[in-house]
Image (cartoon, rainbow, N blue to C red):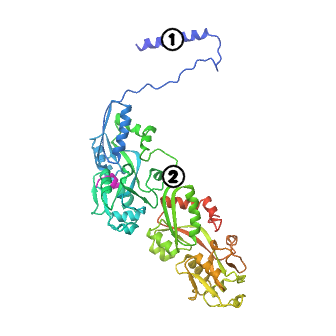
Amino acid sequence: MRRNVFVLSILVLLLGLVITACQPELSVETDEPQVPEETEAPSEELSGQIQLAGSTTVQPLAEVLAEAFMAENPDVTIEVQGGGSSVGVTSAGEGTVAIGNASRNIKDSEFETFPDLQVFTIAFDGIAIVTNPDLELSSLSIDQVKAIFAGEITNFSDVGGPDAEIVVVSREEGSGTRAAFEELVMATGDEEAVITQDALLQQSNGQVRTTVSTTPNAMGYLSFGFLDESVNTVSIDGVEPSVVNVKNGTYPIFRPLNMLTNGDPDELSQSFLDFILSAEGQAIVAEEYITVTDEEETMDELSGQLQLAGSTTVQPLAEVLAEAFMAMYPDVTIEIQGGGSSVGVTSAGEGTVAIGNASRNIKDSEFETFPDLQVFTIAFDGIAIVTNPDLELSSLSIDQVKAIFAGEITNFSDVGGPDAEIVVVSREEGSGTRAAFEELVMATGNEEAVITEDALLQQSNGQVRTTVSTTPNTIGYLSFGFLDESISTVAIDGVDPSVANVKSGDYPIFRPLNMLTNGEPGGLAKAFLDFILSADGQAIVAEEYITVTD
């Protein structure tokens, strides 16, 4: 039979040559007949049954994917059951189902029990912190979430909420959502914590949602796929739980959604998995979850809230930077409060704000109290010696400034000025400007001096400026960012206080402007800091301060 086919093929070929020889010469470009491209023969129609079991997080996604696959392959039936991720691992490993579902990483012990397990990550899922809809709790840090679920924080008033006892709602042992939450939240920091025994345990994400939505003062955690209007979500460090914020790397609590097979998948299971990982399947994934396909990360849709507090010197610069950042990302809100550098250090160290501001170097004692503090120098600031505008005092030495603020020189006539008693104006204890002034001026020379007790103490740079500008015979010190025509500046050893003179190294009194976080910044805080240290951010810094770039 094969010989007959071969002979027939030769005859057909010869006939074609004869016919071609009888044709007139044809133009190759226009008259040669176009041979249609080969197409693959259609594959045999798929048929059969696939059983899946496991994670209740993967279950609704698997059901939607199964419906789409069965619509294309009418002779295929796919049954999807829940049971939790541990059930998915065991069922796949023992071969009682074709595919197991797990919404967490597979444990080493599970690979030891089932060494032939094959893992297919089909999506990523975020885990949101949720509360009863009657609760208003805008943002928490990871440490605060950890302490709440460990039973260490038991009242919402301790985290900026109402005075109400917290009711913790959690998934049961063996749940993939719980395992991921324990890994991503409870195991962070220096010591791993366990979920409180007082937690109300639920058997599915749906039950968690129902319990939280109907129980006053309840808080739980929930897969993104189960979020709806029946519960409120809580931002993490000001970053809202959303697919966009997981994709751009700003939201920290997310985990893989896996499908498992015992060894290489059979033909029908492989076809289903190929469909899930195809463009069509990932388009379905993208409706509720995060795709596994490579996508360029974008910051275009950043959203959430950031709170900053601390140095009143850093505050006006931070406000200008925040305005520029919010103009780029309209769904971001940044709130900035003062309080002084010590407030900034403490607030950042305790995690009550995402970013603390300090206009001085951080003390060793502060690093001992808050060992996880991270310091980001965003600018340098000069400190000017200022006087009432009616005074004429062209230049002082550092030693003369030190003696004046120590109360050792009490009349301007002793330093080339008018015969008038000096009124010293200073910042309060704890101020970053004062700490920098004490370090750069009062601690120079052989002996450290302290600011006179007769000084008029002010709570901000703005108050110093107002007091000096309106009080006769006053002298004070002020951040460059607060200089204006209402006061006079004094040169140091003939060098005027200016950004140019700080950059040239001629002006001696300057200090760093720092932003602080409790541990490595994540989410929105990192995005804001990256902006500040970018060329655009430093261009804003350069308008009033000294940039950190070369």
Sequence order check, earlier mark of 2 and 1: 1
Does the magenta run of residues contain 524?
Answer: no
SS for tag 2? loop
Q: Position of residue 453 (x, y in %)?
A: 56, 88
- Which numbered disc, 2 or 1, marks the residue closer to the eye? 2
Residue type beneath disc 2: Glu
Range drawn in magenta: 172-179
Q: Which mark is residue 472?
A: none
The answer to whether 170 is drawn above or below residue 446 in the figure is above
Residue at position x 38%, y 26% in the image = 44
In the rendered image, residue 177 lying in the magenta stretch gets the answer yes
Position above or below: 501 against 269: below
Q: Is residue 443 visible?
A: no
Give the labeled residue for mark 2.
301
| Mark number displayed over residue 12 | 1
In the rendered image, residue 42, in percent from the top left (x then y), is placed at: 42, 26
Is residue 104 left or right of 310 when viewed as pictured?
A: left
* Relative image position of residue 84 (x, y in whole percent): 30, 49
| Viewer-side residue, 404 vs 191 | 404
**In the image: residue 387, left or right of residue 240:** right
Q: How far apart, in angstroms, are the residues tagged by discs 2 and 1?
A: 64 Å
Helix, strand or loop at disc 1?
helix
- Residue 495 seen: yes
From the viewer's perspective, is 388 left or right of 120? right
Mark 1 closeness class: few <14, some 14–19, many ≥20 residues within 10 Å: few
* Amino acid type for the residue under numbered disc 1: Val
Residue at x 54% of width, y 9% of height: 15
Task: Tell me if mark 2 has few (under 14), some (14-19) or many (20+) residues whose alpha carbon lies within 10 angstroms of its own.
Answer: few
Give residue 159's quadrant in the image. Answer: bottom left
Give how far across and how far down residue 296 sits, in percent: 52, 47
